[in-house]
Image (spheres, coloured by chain):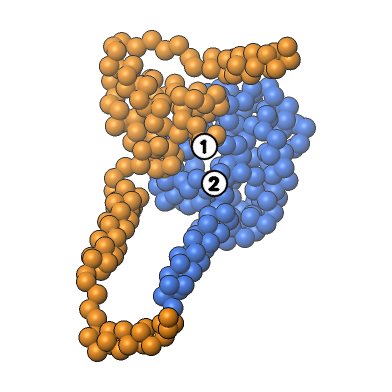
Chain colours: A blue, B orange
């Protein structure tokens, strides 16, 4: 009996592990920044380079940082969702314009509409590195305590907004 | 003629892809060695199966620049690694650190090897043991064999 039971058990275990591995998305690297303080930045505002926005300005409130760029195709896909989120007027949605030409970025916002309370310019991508950004778009939820609560990699869909981001926001706001 | 042309094309096809690395100047050969080791051991997060040295992705260029600048500022290799891990997690390391969550990764193969050795040794010992035979049963078997032999 054990002659067959043991190889069968190993086989079932392997199939289980490989099956689980197949369902994982290798593109989604878990961020080590969850529950860590939001990395500090002070960047000039898109369309108004003389003014700056820093993490200190956002202290004490729940906010969302959405990393976008005019060259990023999936940002167009999630644009409607970000607009819907901003339209709820629950939290400030800040755009991090990542490695982009400001003129192109301004034109992009004119063309598709500007959902962001403010967009800040990360021309050389250094703030992006501090935030562990490795693909655009990415979306962060930051709590009133200044800690990063959630990171979404890739375009936010209506589904992921309702099922993942909104519950976290509601909990942070309550 | 055609196969020759194909071979020439195949051989020279990949040459432009190698010209992606920036020319950084280092203060010392040690620093250059540190840099080369780091960009070879850090993973590019965009292409995932390439290291920073081998990737032409935008982020890989930025991270090479970051690595270079940190070394130029006199930071150690470990400080650069900590910088990357703090931002991108253990995934950036091609050589994972030895810590509680990676014990199984580092020691697992040796554990498996020991398990296999244990099983093999046990089997070999069992095989070497002389087979004990009941004398009466042997006698019985001999009788049966003799009875069944065809009579000449």
Instruction: Identify residue for label 1.
Output: B48
Residue B126 appears in view: yes
Return the chain for callout 2.
Answer: A
Instruction: Identify residue for label 2.
Output: A26
Q: Position of residue B1 (x, y in %)?
A: 73, 11
Query: Does residue B8 appear left or right of residue A56 in this picture?
Result: right
- The residue closer to the viewer here, A12 or B62, is A12
Residue under the image location 46 percent in, 27 percent down: B52
Return the chain for callout 1.
Answer: B
Q: Circles 2 and 1: CB distance less than 8 Å?
A: yes
Q: Position of residue A166 (x, y in %)?
A: 60, 58
Above or below, B152 relative to A26 = below
Badge 1 marks a residue whose secondary structure is: loop
Give residue B117's quadrant in the image. bottom left
Badge 2 marks a residue whose secondary structure is: loop
Crowding at label 2, few (<14), some or many (≥20) Cα neighbours within 10 Å?
few
């Amino acid at each position: 009996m054990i002659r067959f039971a043991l190889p069968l058990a190993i086989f079932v275990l392997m199939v289980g592990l490989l099956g689980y591995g197949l369902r994982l998305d290798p593109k989604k690297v878990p961020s080590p920044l969850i529950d860590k303080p939001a990395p500090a930045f002070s960047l000039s505002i898109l369309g108004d380079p003389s003014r700056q926005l820093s993490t200190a300005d956002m202290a004490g409130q729940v906010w969302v940082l959405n990393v976008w760029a005019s060259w990023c195709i999936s940002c167009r896909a999630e644009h409607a969702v970000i607009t819907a989120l901003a339209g709820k007027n629950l939290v400030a949605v800040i755009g991090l314009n990542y490695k982009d030409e400001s003129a192109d970025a301004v034109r992009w916002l004119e063309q598709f509409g500007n959902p962001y309370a403010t967009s800040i310019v990360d021309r050389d991508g250094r703030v992006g590195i501090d935030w562990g950004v490795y693909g655009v778009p990415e979306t962060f939820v930051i709590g009133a305590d200044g800690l990063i609560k959630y990171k979404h990699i890739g375009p936010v869909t209506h589904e992921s907004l309702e099922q993942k981001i909104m519950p976290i926001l509601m909990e942070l706001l309550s | 003629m055609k196969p020759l042309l194909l071979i020439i094309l195949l051989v020279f096809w990949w040459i432009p892809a190698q010209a992606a690395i920036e020319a950084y100047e280092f203060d010392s050969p040690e620093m250059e060695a540190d840099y080369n080791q780091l960009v070879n051991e850090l993973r590019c997060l965009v292409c995932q199966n390439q290291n920073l040295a081998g990737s032409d992705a935008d982020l890989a260029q930025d991270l090479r620049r970051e690595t270079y600048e940190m070394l130029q500022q006199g930071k150690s290799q470990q400080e650069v690694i900590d910088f990357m891990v703090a931002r991108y997690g253990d995934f950036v390391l091609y050589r994972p650190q030895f810590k509680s969550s990676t014990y199984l990764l580092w020691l697992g193969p040796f554990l498996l090897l020991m398990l296999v050795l244990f099983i093999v040794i046990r089997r070999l010992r069992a095989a070497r043991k002389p087979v004990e035979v009941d004398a009466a049963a042997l006698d019985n078997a001999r009788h049966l064999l003799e009875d069944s032999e065809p009579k000449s």
